[in-house]
Amino acid sequence: MLLVVTYSRAARETLRNACRTHEDAVVRRFGRAALFEETEFGAFLTCRLREKHGHDVQIERTEPFNEFAAVPDGVREAAEAYEAREKTSTPYDKFAAGTDHPDPAAMRTRDL
């Protein structure tokens, strides 16, 4: 997919108009950002936005996130256990202390 992020009012307006006019090329819209299908027409629309608004438009190629391939089992299991905790007000740092769940400080420094 192609992610388009706009940084000016004029660019947001053009993005909004492109999304309304070409709904079949839009995967999802997020206000000042949108995901376009990765087709030649989707690329045409995103390039057109960049041509019109220059640096007020950022375009990135994205790929779907597969949590089972990209995330270690321990992290997924910790997220599942944390969401099933008894007290919803318990922060993860306290929840993970003294358990086999990954340390939040260590998780912040590790890349996927």
Image (cartoon, grey):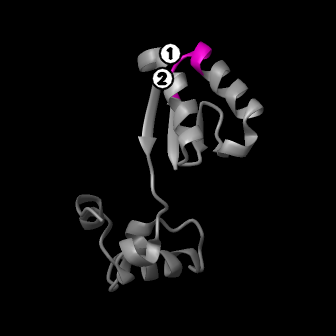
Residue located beneath label 2 in the image: 50
Badge 2 element: helix
Could you say which disc has been placed on residue 82 in the image? none
Residue located beneath label 1 in the image: 53
Q: Amino acid at mark 1?
A: His
Q: Position of residue 88 (x, y in %)?
A: 60, 69
Badge 1 element: helix
Number of numbered discs: 2
Q: Are marks 1 and 2 in contact (CB under 8 Å)?
A: yes
Residue at position x 58%, y 80% in the image? 84
Q: Which image quarter holds the C terminus?
A: bottom left
Q: Which residues are magenta?
A: 6-11
Left or right: where 3 falls relative to 74 = right
Left or right: where 83 falls relative to 23 = left
Left or right: where 68 falls relative to 97 = right
Q: Position of residue 64 (x, y in %)?
A: 49, 61
Q: Amino acid at mark 2?
A: Arg
Q: Is residue 42 magenta?
A: no
